[in-house]
Amino acid sequence: MIEPAPRHRPRKRFAQHFLAPQWAAKVVAAIAPQPGDVFLEIGPGAGALTLPLAARGVPILGVEIDRDLVADLAARAPKNVTIVSGNFLKSDVLPFLSGLEPQHVPGGAPADRPRRRVRVIGNLPYNLSTPILFRLVELQQQHGAFADATVMLQREVADRLVAVAGTKAYGVLTIMLALHARITRVLDLPPGAFRPAPKVRSAVVRLEFRPSPVRINDVALLERVVKRAFGQRRKTLTNALAGLVKDPRAVVEAAGIDPRRRPETLDLPELARLVDRIAGTPQPPVL
């Protein structure tokens, strides 16, 4: 978000931290808009990312919960920007996106026009970043709506997204997002990049949506398994899964995994094998 007019005081209830222009320029450069791109911006605020992107001619749909900022940005934004007032977690944004036409190279023949792709950007409120990420995944699963998402997050959340098996940051969020996207860290930002400065550091990550790299027959069961296992991550896998299956040691061994390993050491292919084995094992009754 660009620094707003002095009359707008950042609101704690919306977790507002406005991005300074020099840092916004770095984020826009990392986004690298191309002909054919259409952007969905979550929380455009005062327009730090919106206005520089709009200057490149790309169409943008911004969804902003703060009505004062909606009115201010709508009055200043060019015609290729549409600002909608609402909560992204509760808004149906796809009909608005379907009406946006991407920029084309002047004079190009229709056959030469780049393929339309919808890209997501946003400086996400830290207290809602995880629900927003899962909402994006939900929309992607249902509609194949997005090519990628470049978002600002609390650095600890970014660390979890890009973590690898065996590290402290590796966990449920890592695994569930890795099913749907290849995730890379793009940029780190200090607290001073925002006004007011948050008490934490921030990072920009890019999610490139793609089909799951492994076959998961029961995603809901995978989520149950990883939540159970990572809730007791210092235990052995056999002990962590006690109560989920009757004979966890036998199930783990049948999946080709050492039952003495800890949950945090299992990569996605190993978890997929484990879930398949659990799915075929009678489960104890839920008390």
Image: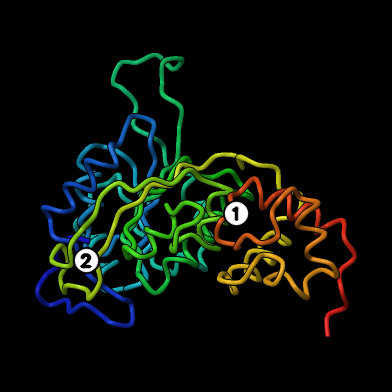
Identify which residue, 93 or 266, lies in the foreground. 266
Residue density around tag 2, few if under 14, some if 14–19, many if 20 or more, within 10 Å: some
Q: Is residue 118 above or below residue 195?
A: above
- The spot of residue 168 in percent (x, y) is 44, 63
Residue density around tag 1, few if under 14, some if 14–19, many if 20 or more, within 10 Å: many
Q: Where on the picture, by quarter, is residue 126?
A: bottom left
Q: Is residue 183 above or below residue 21?
A: above
Residue at 11% x, 70% y: name it: 5
Tell me: 282 left or right of 57: right
> Which residue carries the number 2 mark?
72
Identify which residue, 96 or 56, lies in the foreground. 56
Query: Disc 1 residue type?
Result: Leu
Mark 2 vs 1: CB contact within 8 A: no
Residue at 50% x, 57% y: name it: 174
- Mark seen at residue 266: 1
- The spot of residue 241 in percent (x, y) is 72, 69
- The spot of residue 189 in percent (x, y) is 21, 58
For marks 2 and 1, the one nearer the N-term is 2
Q: Quadrant of the C terminus?
A: bottom right
Query: Disc 2 residue type?
Result: Asp
Tell me: 145 left or right of 84: right
State the SS at label 2: helix
- The spot of residue 24 in percent (x, y) is 18, 52
Residue at 19% x, 57% y: name it: 76
Number of numbered discs present? Answer: 2
